[in-house]
Structures are given as C-alpha cells and as structure tokens.
Image: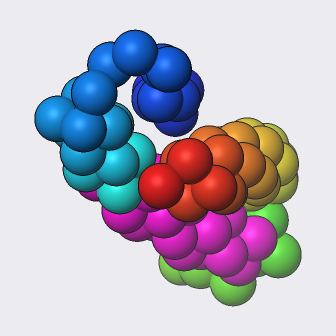
Amino acid sequence: MPAPNVDQPNEGIVGQISNTIANAANYVSETIQGNTAEASKEANKQKAKGNTADDSISNRVSGAMGAASDKLDQHSHEAQAKANKESI
C-alpha cells in the first residue's frame, strides 16, 4: 500500500506531474484491489452460510474468517485509494 506522494515545495513542475501521475495510478490500483477484496468477501459470505457444495462446519468457519479478513482488506484499500485521490 503505497502512501500518496505529496508535492514538496521546491520539486518543480516535473516532480509535481510525476507525483500526480503516480498518485492517479495508485488510486486506480487500490480501487481495483478494493473491488477484488469485496468480491472475495461476498464469495466467502456465501461459503460461511453453507451455500456451496461443501457445507461442512470447517468450510463454513473458513468462509466466515475469510470474509472478515477480506472486509479488512477492502476497507484498507478504500482508505488508500481515498488518500491517493485526494493527493492528485
């Protein structure tokens, strides 16, 4: 999770443009990763509910734990995307 590049007072126009491009690319990357984590979370929620071919207790617990982990990842990526967007 790269931190946004904040413009330095004496870095010049080229540096500012570079930082803007890097922040835009990081924003897109973090947004995609957040969407992927959200999709994985939803799949794991279905697994936790037993809506899959293997509805054993261990598989359901695994799905619940995966959904919780994916939710944390999703929020982390969304926060990073927001930080990068605000730095553009």
Res 38 quadrant in image? bottom right
The residue under the point 17% across, 35% down is 14
Instruction: Give the residues drawn in magenta, as a range.
Output: 25-47
Asked whether residue 54 is drawn in magenta, I would say: no
The residue under the point 24% across, 38% down is 13
Residue placed most toward the observer, 57 or 85: 85
Residue placed most toward the observer, 44 or 10: 10
60 lies left or right of 1: right
44, above or below 20, in the image: below
28 lies left or right of 60: left
Residue placed most toward the observer, 45 or 4: 4
In this orientation, does residue 29 appear? no
16, above or below 45, in the image: above
The residue under the point 52% across, 29% down is 6
Residue placed most toward the observer, 58 or 41: 41
SS majority, magenta: helix
Res 50 quadrant in image? bottom right
Which residue in the rendered view is the most extreme toward the left? 14
41, above or below 50, in the image: above
Q: In x, y percent, where is residue 78?
A: 66, 57
The residue under the point 28% across, 27% down is 12
Q: How is the image coloured?
A: rainbow
In this orientation, does residue 72 appear? yes
Asked whether residue 40 is drawn in magenta, I would say: yes
Res 81 quadrant in image? bottom right
Q: In x, y percent, where is residue 42?
A: 66, 75
